[in-house]
Amino acid sequence: ISQASAPLPAGYDFVENFFWNNRILQPDGQDIVYSVLGDQPLTMPLGRLLVTLLLDCCAYPGFTQPPGTKEMGPVPGHPYLETKRLWCGGVGVPDCQIPSSNATIDSDRIDVLRCILACCTQTLYEKDGLYRNRFTEALAIPTSPQAVTLCYSMLNVVAAYNPRGTLPYTSWMGVSREALVDAALHVLLTALDYSYFSWRTPGDKNTQEHSSTQASSSSASNEHSFWIVLQNITSESDCQVIYKGLTTLLGNHVDAANTYLPMSQKTISCHAELLLLLWKLIDVNKTFRATICKKFDICQLMVCLLWYVYESHGDQIKNGILQITTFIILSLSGERDLGIALNAPFTKSFPVEMALFAGNHVDLLLMLFHHVIMTNKPWVKSLHDCLFITICNLSPYIKGMSMNTASKLIHLIDVFTSPKNMARADAKHITNVGLLVESFNNLIQYQYEGNVSVVYGIIRAHQCFERIEQMCSDPKPGDDPHLPKLHPQVREQIQINTIMRLLAALKPELEARPKGATETEMLSFLRATTLVGLLPVPHPILIRRFDSQTHTHAWVTTWTWGIIYLRAITPPMLDGNNIRLFRITAGDDYEKPPESKGKEKGPVPIPMPASSSTPAEFPEPEPGKQDLPPRPGYL
């Protein structure tokens, strides 16, 4: 210890030499290689030996494992899982077959997990997450039963935790279990995040060239025990365990906001970690994503996600929650079964300050998206394309949209296609307009009878769509000189022909109706009208699926470690002065521009990406502004 704490020469990498080369620098300058440890030969690097010992500690009888735990034999579909080492049943093994733990064992497990997390923190002290982390590699050896079983244990601990309590105020009990859930989530996220992209060695300046020579993330996942565990969650019973657990925990904040007795329901603090875990599950395991949309009550999860979107959109400090939740909803929207499921009536209370409505779950989604977009927050603007793609993906399956929701959707396209906004529109703005028009086309061509409220709204707002057609056509006499003309290449993104054919067929008939006709009579008339032969041939349904890219993963890595850093302040475990992955600012200075050097006053430091800038405010985009969140790709 005295040798290790002595001053080291400049540029000497103590961690690399001591833990991975078994070398230590002596006071006289000699570099000694250790080949024995005690009276045993040293056959592996000290770093790997340390991780191996910590994994063994995770299943030590009487310490982190209840005495008398028995092996139940191999579990089909879950290779390398050792049931005698499991902390909790659930995925792979029913809960009744695993002995229950106590507060003392939970406390010991937390200590071991914190040690593992401390070993894997090298990522924090590099300028990005692309550097090689040997400790994490040693933790995630694919053929290690200890690592595989630990991953199952942590997943099951998270899925089995229920913070609701049986009676009011009983949820405040069981603090040790919540602390164990937090520690398990942090180690899980640390390990799962590492194999998102190929590593590079420190000092490698040619990142792109080096990364191109490495294995892809899909092949890397085959060499990562934690990813293998996630990919093996394919049976309906295992998916149900994970889905039920995550939905219960993510709904904790919604439940707490709906109680009659004040503070009768404790709110957990790990909602950000739970969203990240859900994101990694649906990103790496497409079977899990399809199963939860088709087999389970996906509306229950969507209500929780929509609540997080609403609750976080107005506060820039919660921008990370908004981004990851939006990405999750976008990824789920690529599943046809989600669009069908959202047509179910929404009958529960939603604790937000929005206009009350009677409708289905898709009404809730569209009204909330309209509210979020129109709040005009600069950090929300960069997520507009994600929100519009979600709407477009769901539009072919939407039925029974309420009149109030239809008016909100038409209001969106009216605002986005105003002459002022179209005159200043950039490529992203044009794409968003094209997505909105495509959404209306889908509603008309695939769900006309179920969405006559949308058709009626289009006819009432015909001037908006006639304006769009004029902007997308060549100049001709009689055109409004104040309307900008779009470039021919841009016009191809805005397919307004279907809507104009609809207006040509139905607008004269509605105008010919008696002036005293009520809205109900108008809707009944439209519902009984057929458009067969009047509209163009229906276009194929185009679903834009989420395609994860390197910059998205880089942001997820930064945000993941930022959350872990904030949660590890008490008790302190990380050296904030030497962190390079993100910059740390005081809470009171968060809103200041990057060049501001205000004095730090806030007691809680807030991690931010190393380089970011504020996007221009909607609806007047400025060129040259970099978006705050990473941009996902779409197929």
Image (cartoon, rainbow, N blue to C red):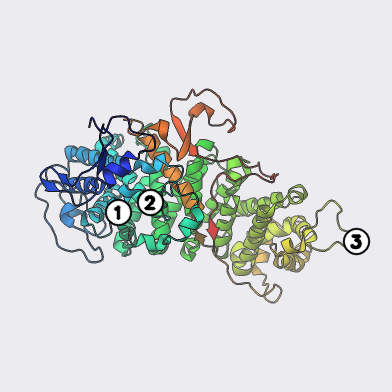
Instruction: Please indicate whether residue 278 sits to the left or right of residue 493 in the image.
Output: left
Between marks 2 and 3 in the image, the one whose residue lies nearer the viewer: 2
In the picture as drawn, the residue positioned furthest to the right comes out as 477
N-terminal of the two: label 1 or label 3? Answer: 1
Label 1 element class: loop
Q: Residues within 10 Å of mark 3 (few under 14, many from 20)?
A: few
Look at mark 2 in the image and give the residue it sits on. 194
Q: Position of residue 41 (x, y in %)?
A: 14, 49
N-terminal of the two: label 2 or label 1? Answer: 1
Q: CA distance from mark 1 to mark 3?
A: 69 Å
Look at mark 1 in the image and give the residue it sits on. 140
For the point 53% across and 52% down, the residue is 365
Label 1 sits on what residue type?
Ala
For the point 25% across and 60% down, the residue is 143
Q: Position of residue 531 (x, y in %)?
A: 68, 72
Marks 2 & 1, CB-CB < 8 Å contact: yes
Label 2 sits on what residue type?
Tyr
Q: Residues within 10 Å of mark 2 (few under 14, many from 20)?
A: many
Q: Position of residue 428 (x, y in %)?
A: 65, 53
In the picture as drawn, the residue positioned furthest to the bottom comes out as 533
Look at mark 3 in the image and give the residue it sits on. 477
Compare residues 267 and 619 and report the one nearer the observer: 619
Label 2 element class: helix
The circle on residue 462 is none
Q: Quadrant of residue 626?
A: top right
N-terminal of the two: label 2 or label 3? Answer: 2
Instruction: Please indicate whether residue 223 sits to the left or right of residue 630 in the image.
Output: left
